[in-house]
Image (cartoon, rainbow, N blue to C red):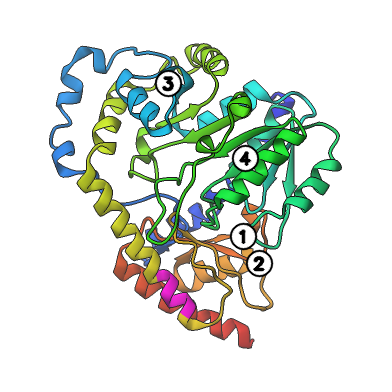
């Protein structure tokens, strides 16, 4: 019935517990949605109250440019110190990443992703006929020599895909680590794709460095940046994203957009411009998420049950589970069924033995209550 390539498309691992969550909620039970990679903070009230104006201008709800609206292109050009000819707007970061896979990977190419990795990468790489090669490590940090050794084993090394800051771990790569990755990619003639969706969600005491700021003029042609306001500005439902790349790629990508999505809705891009330029909202938004993150981290650290680094970025914590009889998947299922605590197993991200906890969709009180229940139940499981 379906084309063979559809065998490579699997249901998203991040949605695996959704049916059970819906069932529990239908029964009237409380569910702590620490599985949900979204943010429940509302957009600025002054922008929301003016929403009708985005639909009053005919040009804002008709066809638009397949590259993107000039307002957001100009904003991003300043953000990355590039020209608007090096940017194309996409229908979310997922579509941006899929477009990159479609345009850059040939049958049999080896694409290196670093574990832990966002689960969508694997399906997108494989559906276009390339091989998703997972570089496994004991921590999110990359050992340059081990990465070289791994690449040496590959038949057709084509690209390295790095997520910085990382989903699910929250790890933010240092300037030195990023420079090492660029150096290795250059040695092997590989492309670099940097998924920087969480680049604007780095908290106090941490620093995010975009790969675009590090790349040499000679290597610009082989670097592709992906971004989105979905998590950094609470605009996930608008399906907005972008690619920063060389002019030749962007020109061809515009053609791909014209034959697939035509264009991202103009009114959504107009709202995006207003949101990213709303300084008060940006400051308050990040402060709220940092408070939630710190609350969850403090509760888990105080329990002294989990190995957990304070990464100070993204909306995720990624604790390593203590030794127990349950696997990470069994642990998550047990917590959901018995305590209503929804999380995702590290195995969904290529790193078994961990769990991903999101603070994006919960209030501070829900985090406090949920972490208390989580710690209490984990203590019981350890003793069994």
Name the spot of residue 318 as percent of width and height, x first. Answer: 54, 63
Q: Vertically, is 122 above or below 336?
A: above
Residue at 56% x, 66% y is 332
Local secondary structure at mark 2: loop
The residue wearing badge 4 is 121
Q: Residues within 10 Å of mark 4 (few under 14, many from 20)?
A: some
Local secondary structure at mark 4: helix
Of callouts 2 and 3, which one flags the residue occurring earlier in the amino acid sequence? 3
Of callouts 1 and 3, which one flags the residue occurring earlier in the amino acid sequence? 3
* Segment colored magenta: 296-301
Name the spot of residue 25 as percent of width and height, x first. Answer: 39, 60
CA gap between label 1 and label 3 equals 39 Å
The residue wearing badge 1 is 346
Q: Is residue 337 left or right of residue 73?
A: right
CA gap between label 4 and label 3 equals 28 Å
Of callouts 1 and 2, which one flags the residue occurring earlier in the amino acid sequence? 1
CA gap between label 4 and label 2 equals 20 Å
Q: Nearer the viewer, residue 33 or 43?
A: 43
The reply to whether discs 2 and 3 touch (Cβ–Cβ < 8 Å) is no
Local secondary structure at mark 1: helix
């Amino acid at each position: 019935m379906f084309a063979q390539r559809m065998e490579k498309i699997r249901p998203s691992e991040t949605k695996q517990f959704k049916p059970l969550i819906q069932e529990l909620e239908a029964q009237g039970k409380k569910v702590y949605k620490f599985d949900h990679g979204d943010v429940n903070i509302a957009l600025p009230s002054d922008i929301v109250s003016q929403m009708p104006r985005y639909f009053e201008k005919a040009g804002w709800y008709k066809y638009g440019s397949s590259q993107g609206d000039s307002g957001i292109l100009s904003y991003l050009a300043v953000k990355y110190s590039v020209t608007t000819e090096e940017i194309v707007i996409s229908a979310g970061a997922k579509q941006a990443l899929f477009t990159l896979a479609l345009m850059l990977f040939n049958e049999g190419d080896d694409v290196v992703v670093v574990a832990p990795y966002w689960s969508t990468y694997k399906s997108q790489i494989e559906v276009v006929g390339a091989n998703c090669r997972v570089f496994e490590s004991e921590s999110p940090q990359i050992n340059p020599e081990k990465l070289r050794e791994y690449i040496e084993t590959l038949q057709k090394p084509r690209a390295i895909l790095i997520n910085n800051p990382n989903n699910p771990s929250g790890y933010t790569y240092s300037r030195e680590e990023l420079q090492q990755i660029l150096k290795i990619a250059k040695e092997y003639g590989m492309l670099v794709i940097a998924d920087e969706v969480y680049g604007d969600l780095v908290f106090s005491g941490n620093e995010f460095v975009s790969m675009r700021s590090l790349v040499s003029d000679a290597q610009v042609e082989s670097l592709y940046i992906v971004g989105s306001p979905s998590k950094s500005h609470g605009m996930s439902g608008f399906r907005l994203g972008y690619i920063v790349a060389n002019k030749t790629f962007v020109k061809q990508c515009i053609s791909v957009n014209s034959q697939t999505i035509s264009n991202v809705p103009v009114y959504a891009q107009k709202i995006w411009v207003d949101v990213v330029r709303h300084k008060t909202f940006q400051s308050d938004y990040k402060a709220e998420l940092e408070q939630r993150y710190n609350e969850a981290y403090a509760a888990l650290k105080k329990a002294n049950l989990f190995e957990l680094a304070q990464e100070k970025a993204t909306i995720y914590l990624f604790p390593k589970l203590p030794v127990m009889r349950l696997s990470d998947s069994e642990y998550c299922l047990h917590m959901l069924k018995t305590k209503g605590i929804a999380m995702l197993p590290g195995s969904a991200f290529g790193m078994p033995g961990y769990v991903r906890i999101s603070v994006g969709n919960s209030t501070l009180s829900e985090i406090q209550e949920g972490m208390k229940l989580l710690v209490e139940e984990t203590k019981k499981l350890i003793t069994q």
